[in-house]
Structures are given as structure tokens and as C-alpha cells.
Image (cartoon, rainbow, N blue to C red):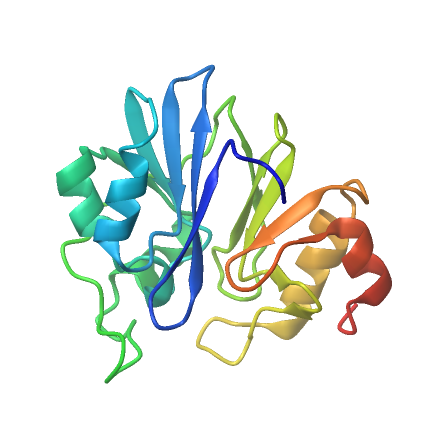
Amino acid sequence: MKNQMFKKITVGMLDVNCFLVPVAESEKLYIIDPGADASKIIAEAKKFDYKEVEILLTHAHVDHIGAIAELMLDLGVKTVRLHGADNELYFSPENHLLPYVPAAKGLPQPVNEFECADFEAIHTPGHTPGGVCYYFKNFPVLFTGDTIFAGSIGRTDFPGGNLDVLLESIREKVMSLPDDLVMLPGHGPETTVGTERKHNPFL
């Protein structure tokens, strides 16, 4: 997507797409899914003008949350938003991929409320119970996390995953959006709603 208003950084050994999204109207910088490589994220964040930084989590799997503690300290982040259905996973000591990705440490209590003029949070459970897509209508773009990818969908074989629930989330809440809406997943390349409606083999 040829859009210089936000920044994508691929982080960690699982190549998570972390996004830095500035919103001029609120003077906020949103950091979506800071999974690892905190120093890279911090360096890019400091290139933006903002008064406040918030972290938005599409879900609580460890590969999407690993850099939170360092960002809180270095960037003065006060708010981490996460759907409440993923709170247990977020804090679980079993939320790891050992020996490669240890459980995250120093995590703050997340905020489970999403009312905000800058974006719409769309609850899309199935990959995890608290999966969320973030719809920034001013761009417009949909950050889909691990709900749906270009040509694929999120895994449902982890604890809390449910294939039927995930497919219902995608069909009812994502495929109902405009065909030309750009979707930026948590892994892999961008796509659009229309492209996935026509070509995603899982749909």
C-alpha cells in the first residue's frame, strides 16, 4: 500500500507485522501488535509527532505482545487496549513458544474499552476469543491481526481457537466491509476485502 502516513515494521522470528499509525486529529500514535524488537519500534515511533502513544492489540498471542513492557518505559505509553476475552491468555505463563519465544514479562493491565473516534474495533473471535480488527476509516484501512491473511485465515488449533467461530467472524464482520478496503494482516502481505471474497480458499 503506497501510504506514507503509517509505518509497518516486521518484528520477531515469526515476522509479525507491527504498525505505527499516527492520527493528526487526536495527536496520537497508535502502535498495533508490538511483538518483538522493541528498539526498532521505538526508533521509528520517535520519527512521528504525537502527544500520546497507545498500544492496540489485535489479540494476545505472545508473538504480538513481547515488546510492550519496553515501549511502556521508553515511549511513556499509558494505555494498552485488548479485548477482555483475551485477558487470561495475555497474562498466562503458558503463553509462549519455547524455546524460541518466551512468555512476555512486565505486562501492564490492559484497558478493555474501545470507544474512540479514531478507529472502530471489530470483535472477530475464532483465532483467539478476544480477536479484534481495527478499522481506521480516515485512511481507510483495516488491521486484521491473525483473523484473516492474504489467501488464508488464522490458525484455530491453539487453545481458545475455533474454526467455525472464526469463519463466522470473517463472513459476517469482515466480508461485509467495502470490496476496495485494504486489509493489513498480522503476518504477510496486504490484501483487500474484495480479493479475499473472490480468491480466499477458506471462504
Pick the front one: 80 or 43? 43
The residue shown at (63%, 39%) is 141
Percent across and percent down for residue 192 are 73, 51
Residue 98, by quadrant, is bottom left
Residue 175 in view: no
Percent across and percent down for residue 145 are 52, 56
Is residue 52 rendered to the left or right of residue 5? Answer: left
Which quadrant is home to the N terminus? top right
Is residue 31 rendered to the left or right of residue 118? Answer: left
Residue 30 in view: yes
The residue shown at (58%, 72%) is 162
Is residue 144 rendered to the left or right of residue 170? Answer: left
Pick the front one: 33 or 80? 33
Q: Is residue 105 above or below residue 96?
A: above
Percent across and percent down for residue 28 are 37, 24
The residue shown at (60%, 60%) is 189
